[in-house]
Image (cartoon, rainbow, N blue to C red):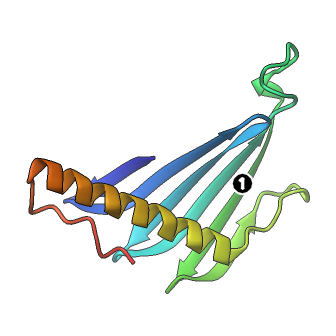
Amino acid sequence: MKLFFHEDILYKFIVIHYYEMGQDLVEFYIKNRKLYFIYVKETKYNTHFMEDDFDLNKSEYYEVRSYFKNYELIHQICSKDSNVRIYDKDILVSDYFYYIDFFNEKSKVIDSLTNIKGKSYLLLR
């Protein structure tokens, strides 16, 4: 997970999921402490990454852009390939809250271990 801050406020984070036949890059964008945009780039490998004929240049790429208002999906744009699956808004939003909760818990542990106060990354829900 890579986190981006502006004046101690989280405005974006990126999560990359790796698996045997591809990877997903997911970017979550936050405005006014609420989720407003998710960008997903799926990479489907041409074969298992351990095979001799694996070639990243032969991978297929799909993109999905999802726009939210008050955690409700208001618009979704998928890459032109018809094989792209439409992302369920409930799954996207639940993923967002999962990562926010994970980060909030990690922040609490770091604060308690280092006694560094004054930086609050909570309240993103």
Quadrant of the frame with the C terminus: bottom left
Where is residue 76 drawn, in percent x and y?
70, 72
Q: Residue furthest top?
A: 52
Q: Is residue 88 left or right of residue 118?
A: right
Q: Which residue corresponds to the image point at 81% horizontal and 33% vertical from the top-left?
A: 45
Q: Image quarter for residue 61?
A: top right
- Image quadrant assignment for residue 7: bottom left
Of the residues shown, which amino acid type is indicated by label 1? Glu
Circle 1 residues within 10 Å: few <14, some 14–19, many ≥20: some
In this rendering, is residue 113 above or below 32?
above
- How many numbered circles does the render carry? 1
Residue at 44% of width from left, 55% of height from top? 13
Q: Residue at x 57, y 64 (%)?
A: 38
The front one of 32 and 101 is 101
| Residue furthest out toward the right | 82
Determine whether 106 is above or below 71 in the image.
Answer: above
Residue 83: name its quadrant. bottom right
Name the side, left or right, on which 15 lies relative to 65: left
Residue at image mark 1: 63
Across and down, in percent, residue 35 comes to 47, 73
Residue 39 position (above or below residue 75): above
77 or 113: nearer the eye? 113
Position of 100 with respect to 90 (left or right) is left
Q: Position of residue 110 (x, y in %)?
A: 22, 51
Q: Is residue 38 left or right of residue 60?
A: left
